[in-house]
Amino acid sequence: MPYAGDVDVKAAYEALTASPNTVLVDVRTRAEWNFVGVPDLRALGKEVVFTEWQGFPAGSPVPDFVATLSAELERKGLDKTVQIYFLCRSGARSLNAAIAMTQAGYGSCFNIADGFEGPLDGTGHRGSAGGWKACGLPWIQS
């Protein structure tokens, strides 16, 4: 497998709670962070790392994603053995980010499968059928 695997949001939150050497990386766009909300890890004494996988509004990949995230992790004193949990809206961009960071030598990169908003529900909306928000995990909105 080209990365450590998929986990659901509750398993990711439990891992973030259990170990000081786990990191949550939100790879959504700045627009999503500002308008949809972000995970809140303050109760765990942690901060989410925000690094866009794709730029907005074009949707094109950020060419220096790996270098940017690697530098941020290093700045926090974390090496390539850190467990990283990647989050996006629904699990697609975070999967690609987990693969990219694994290829860069990080050994424990997990994709949070349902992401922050989860899959579409029967009415075509996100946020109620799964994901960080729908599972009742802590989040905030600006």
Image (cartoon, helix red, strand yellow):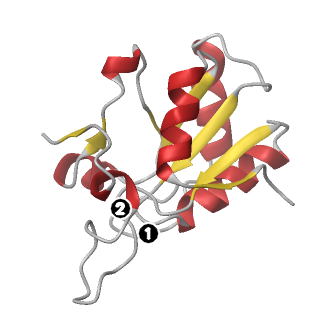
Percent across and percent down for residue 60 are 50, 67
Total label count?
A: 2
Q: Is residue 4 left or right of residue 137?
A: right
* Residue 114 placement (x, y as % from top left): 47, 63
Question: Image height check: is 59 above or below 97?
Answer: below
Q: What residue is shown with label 2? A: 56
Residue at 79% across, 53% down: 3
**Disc 1 marks which amino acid?**
Gly
Q: Quadrant of the N terminus?
A: bottom right
Looking at the rendering, in which quadrant would you find the C terminus? Answer: top left
Position above or below: 93 against 31:
below
Q: Give the SS element for disc 1.
A: loop
Task: Report how far apart the C-alphas of labels 1 and 2 lie in the structure.
Answer: 5 Å
The reply to whether the C-beta atoms of the residues labelled 1 and 2 are less than 8 Å apart is: yes
Give the residue at mark 1: 59
102 lies above or below 122: above
